Image (cartoon, rainbow, N blue to C red):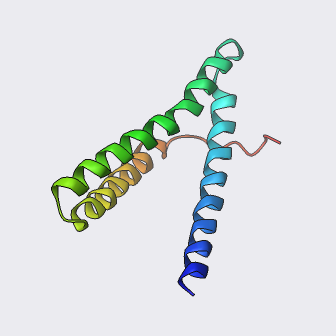
Amino acid sequence: MIFVVITAVCTAVFFTLTLIVVTAITYVQMETPPEMLGKVLALFSMLPFLAQAMGQFGFGVLLEVFTPWVPVFVAIAMSVLITIYSAKHLRGVPLRNDVV
């Protein structure tokens, strides 16, 4: 039963992340000048790999130093801070519905 729950949650998370990535790439393509598009998209695709490696390193260090609950709460706090920061800075970004 727990396997089914984990699979369902992971599927929902991956589905949501796919929607976010497609929307973000579309926005970046619309806002980037054509001559810089290759460089910007290369950076855009490299950043998640770097963030994943840094996150795993930081999480590993925290697990070695603290009890397992401390890194979990740090991850939750960072997620909340990123959400607040993103909401504050993306509030003025216009949505374009004319893109096909």
Work out which quarter of the rendered image holds the N terminus and state it.
bottom right
Furthest toward the front, the residue is: 64
Location of residue 26 in the rendering, given as x and y in whole percent from the top left corner: 69, 38
Q: Write the residue at 62% across / 45% down.
A: 21
The quadrant in which residue 69 appears is: bottom left
Q: How many marks?
A: 0
Work out which quarter of the rendered image holds the C terminus and state it.
top right
Furthest toward the top, the residue is: 35
Figure check: 19 above or below 13:
above
Location of residue 77 in the rendering, given as x and y in whole percent from the top left corner: 29, 58
Location of residue 36 in the rendering, given as x and y in whole percent from the top left corner: 64, 15
Q: Write the residue at 53% across / 83% down.
A: 2
The quadrant in which residue 28 appears is: top right
Left or right placement of residue 20 versus residue 90 in this view: right
Figure check: 36 above or below 99:
above
The quadrant in which residue 14 appears is: bottom right
Furthest toward the bottom, the residue is: 1
- Which of the pair 52/81 is nearer the observer? 52
Furthest toward the right, the residue is: 100
- Which of the pair 26/63 is nearer the observer? 63
Q: Write the residue at 60% across / 41% down.
A: 94
Location of residue 4 in the rendering, given as x and y in whole percent from the top left corner: 61, 81
